[in-house]
Image: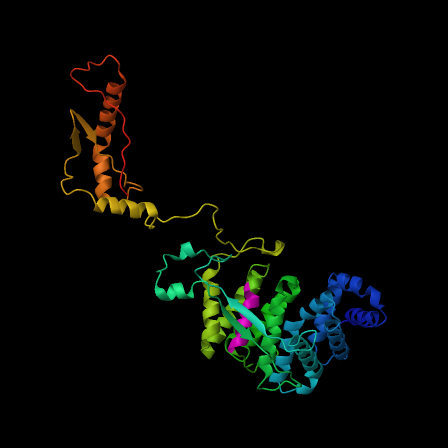
Amino acid sequence: MLAVDTGVVEEWLSEFKTLPEASISSYATNLKDKSALVSSLYKVIQEPQSELLEPVCHQLFEFYRSGEEQLLRFTLQFLPELMWCYLAVSASRDLQSSGCIEALLLGVYNLEIVDKQGHSKVLSFTIPSLSKPSVYHEPSSIGSMALTEGALSQHGLSRVVYSGPHPQREMLTAQNRFEVLTFLLLCYNAALSYMPAVSLQSLCQICSRICVCGYPRQQVRKYKGVNSRIPVSSEFMVQMLTGIYYAFYNGEWDLARKAMDDILYRAQLELYPEPLLVANAIKASLPQSAMKSSKEGTRCIQVEITPTSSRISRNAVTSMSIRGHRWKRHEQPENGNDATELGNFIIPEISVTNVAGERTGNGEKSRALAENDVQHLQGVQETATDPRTDSKGIPEIRRQKSVIPI
């Protein structure tokens, strides 16, 4: 660690201690723009033997419990690197050098599992229904869903999954380690949209390192330092994939792709069904090639927007189709003739059931009579309106309203 980095960190430690309470808000707002400070803090965390590690961890915890939102997010951005350092030291059996990092992780965990009144929090997650549109899908694009009794009974019902209450922890052990780390990564993913690019890069790198350390792929990745395998849980890997999926579309395509391949590699070795399902789903949804200009800013995911006009299926059952079906059923059996004589004139039969051209019986019949009907009606109208017509041979025609029983 360079002397310049040491001076930047020491200045940061002393600055906050002498800061008046009225200036904390403006200080927190300007803190995220200090890239040199962030880089120096990463170097301190990556050196477990550094003398500045303990005061840095203490300062970050003070930020987190201050109640200032900007200071809380400033601490959260270092969470992936802190997790990796703790797991790497735990794998090397040198737990004494990770005491301050463990205390910071436990402090953040114990603060997050309770609300402002000190009561245990219960997190709820609503699972979306495929029968209702969302920003990710349209029910019409999935296909026709059968309206069975079971489907109708489930329509409108939402499934809610609850997480918690979580017990407080005084120390990290092999039994509760990944329970705590999974919850912390869940809190980090909840603030992903506020995380800077350097934090997303750290997330992708530590996910890749955790999954391949101690396995043959470590030689391919050329990772040095930790050579022993780091145990992981299925839930922890799913939370890693959540953050990586966000990194894909926010400027870190290459690192996110490498991390996802390593997580999929580890999930196949461990035979974990949940990360296998999530990783393969993400892989199938990605575009064929890397997104261009991914470093220029936040990218977006293309979704289908619900159109303003309503979609009506060609085979939809409507009131008009039911009415037409009723008329077709009550037609006379001797309806083979295309016309009926009335006096000396022929009145054409006009089909009223040809609504969308889908009923073959009435549709074919109306198409066959279309031209004859038009010509005959024109002749009838000309005869009725011509005053010079001889009334001896042709009777007078009067328009009558045809009433069709419904």
Question: Residue 172 placed where, x, y %?
Answer: 63, 85
Residue drawn where x is 43% and y is 47% of the image:
310
State whether residue 84 is above or below residue 402.
below
Task: Examine the structure image and report whether residue 237 is included in the region drawn in magenta.
Answer: yes
Q: Is residue 202 left or right of residue 219?
A: right
- Single out the residue that lies furthest toward the top: 388
Question: Residue 112 placed where, x, y %?
Answer: 66, 75
**Quadrant of the image occupied by residue 175:** bottom right
Specify the segment rendered in magenta: 234-245
In this rendering, the count of numbered labels is 0
Instruction: Tell me the colour scheme of the image.
Output: rainbow
**Quadrant of the image occupied by residue 39:** bottom right
The front one of 222 and 75 is 75
Residue drawn where x is 73% and y is 73% of the image:
65
Task: Examine the structure image and report whether residue 359 is included in the region drawn in magenta.
Answer: no
The front one of 373 and 264 is 373
Magenta: predominant secondary structure element? helix
Q: Is residue 138 left or right of residue 258?
A: left
Question: Residue 19 placed where, x, y %?
Answer: 84, 68
Q: Quadrant of the N terminus?
A: bottom right
Q: Is residue 221 visible?
A: no
The front one of 272 and 5 is 272
Q: Is residue 49 left or right of residue 208?
A: right
Residue drawn where x is 58% and y is 63% of the image:
247
Residue drawn where x is 69% and y is 67% of the image:
73
The front one of 356 and 6 is 356
Q: Is residue 118 visible?
A: yes
**Quadrant of the image occupied by residue 340:** top left
